[in-house]
Image (cartoon, rainbow, N blue to C red):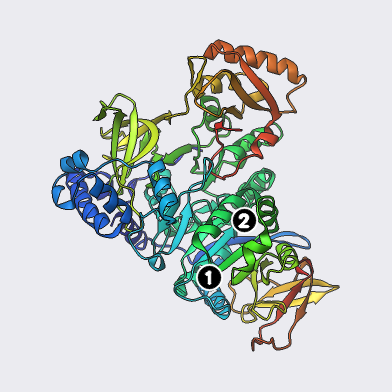
Amino acid sequence: MARADTLARARTLDRPELAYLMRFPTADGVRDLELTWAELARDTEWATARLREHGLAAGQRALLTASGFEGFWGHAVIGALRALKVPYGIAEAMGWDHRRTAVFHRELTPHAVIGLSAETLEGLAGMTDIGEMFRSTPVVLARPTAVPVLRGVGVTASVISAVGPALALECPERSGAHVNAAEWRFGERDGQLTVAAGEGRTSPLPETPLGITGRVVVSRCGCGSDNPRVLLAEAN
Amino acid sequence: MVGDRDTADRYFEPQVETMPREELRARQEKQLLELVEYAYANSAFYRELWDEHGVHPRDIRSVEDFRARIPFITKDMIRAYRSRTGDAFAGLLCVPVEELTSVSSSSGTTGDPEFFAEIWQDAPPLVTAQVRDLWELGLRPGDRVLSPPGTFRNFMDAGFQALGAVVIEVDTWMGNMPEVVEALRTYRPAYLQMMYPQMVELEHLAEKTDLKEAFSSLKGASCAGQPLSRKMKERIRDDWGIDVYEYTSAADTGTAWECREHDGFHLWEDTVFAECVEVDEHGWHDVPESDLGELVATDLDNRAAPLIRYRSEDLVRLSRDTCGCGRTHARMWVAGRRGDETVVQGRSVVLRDVWQAVEDQPETVAGVFQIVRDRREVDELRLRVGYDPHLTGDVDALAGRLSEAVRERTGVKPVLDMRTEEDLLKTMTSVAKFPRVVKT
């Protein structure tokens, strides 16, 4: 197999430990942070556990909508779907690509739609009843600004979002998006979220205000997790 | 900066890339015979089609048998099968859906998108087949690349990372070029993928930004989705100092890239069996290597849903001569799409002539235009043209000049619909394609 041979050759290269240099907005401008393969593996493991809580399992299908610069969390989600043996379709998160989202949704009948954006919903609303479209989808993980739109039409959507350098993912309890406490320290200052890197991260990140309005909940979630949750203002 | 031409390790897989053609042919024959058996056993679409044509895998014992007996397929045939059966994969799927890793799709600019079923380990198939091309461009472990704008055919990152490159997460889609320029200066990447609208936007930045300095860390940049015009290519290479590598679709089986010689698009013939033919009501025949024909492609490395003798509608010239780079795999030169020609009151109008006329006006030098038609034969040539408002004082005067320039090149006076470039580019519904021929 030609491609398998190509990748076998690629595996012989002396590759760096670094996979991504991610950039994220903070209250004081854009900041970058290194992301290693070891960290990606841990992030993938964490995302796998979260998606498993939503009931994703072999035999189902998913639809992921994302943009090209979202690989740092896209990698973790795709890795999780692969670990769970859930094939995924992929469309852009940008509003003008809503038709492909509609076709994937119609043809693949996904068990989960992950990463829906408000822009995609706006495009879809011009051609279909989005409530009818997504109410029958068992798991809808939407970006913060899309969540109120979906909930407004009776779709039980949960939040998925990059919050600074971390992925936040709401469990089926829908009482705030979990973040991985083993990797990140979230806090709040003047109603704004802050983040700092945990000891295990390669790149140091001191407490950094993110410019995101929200709260941190540290009490045990109904799902049994002790991971803290972030309540994002724009998702409510 | 032009790519490093002194790199000794030019080939990523030298034994494959420079394989003597007889060996390549023998390898393809083996792959084709296996493919025919496999597809007949596992694909409802091919089994039905080949049964209708009285073809069975036992009849296929050579490349010649394959070409003589296996029928062509077209996009319309696939759509018809899907419509008739309700099967999203149109009967092409050779494995249960559960065995797929992912499903990407075509842009869907001319109808419902076509699905591409994918099975993969380290990296999705499309970008994996580009690893050799990226190596040729000069990408090496430790280099940095800017993330591409979309996820059109899956995330591309894994392909770059397979080569040991580090991906810098930057939104490189329309409207973000100042940020891209800043990222180029900050992170000094070796590679980025560019799309047509980005170039139009960069063109606007060029007056107040030293793009040559900003791009100076690049070993190369790629561009796909549509051919670059002569003027745009000169601008990118000469004024911005970028060694730009165009690539195009290998009839939906993968992609075909220019090498450093910039003399045609290499098809990786261990992944695709390519034919260049003329098809008419009497049948088909090969076209001589110097002539234009339609690219017909067969997937040789796709066990999920292979395309077999797929008519691409791409008009190409194909050569199997060894390239100046030493690679033995065929190259093609793309002339356009079958069906893109418009006949206006009996007179043939081709995109290239319109493009030239549009580019010759300073206000429309970016070449943002579309032919608007609901059928191939029309009474009037309707053109939608994007202009740069910063360079345009009098739109009516521009329209007058443009109309005359188009008439001179095509013999047809057009009906013009003038828009700003931004307005026209906003109508794009794909990161990969700006459609040149539209219905409305």
Residue B265 placed where, x, y %?
38, 36
| Residue at mark 1 | A40
Q: Residue B133: horizontal and vertical position, in percent?
A: 39, 46
- Which residue: 66% across, 77% down? A179
| Residue B157, visible in the rendered structure | yes
The local secondary structure at tag 2 comes to loop
Q: Amino acid type of disc 1?
A: Leu
Q: Residue at x 24, y 29 (%)?
A: B285
Residue lying furthest front in this view? Answer: B84
Q: Nearer the viewer, residue B51 or A205?
A: B51
On screen, residue B138 versus residue B357, left or right, reads left
Q: Would you say residue B300 is visible in this rendering?
A: no
Say which label, 1 or 2, has the lower sequence index: 1
Given the image, on which type of amino acid does mark 2 rest? Ala
Q: Residue at x 46, y 49 (%)?
A: B114
Chain ID, mark 1: A
Label 1 sits on a secondary structure element that is helix
Image: B404 above or below A191 = above
- The mark found on residue A93 in the picture is 2
Q: Is residue A28 above or below residue B212?
A: below
Label 1, label 2: how many angstroms apart (C-alpha)? Answer: 22 Å
Q: Quadrant of the C terminus of chain B?
A: top right
Residue A95 at x, y percent in the picture: 66, 51
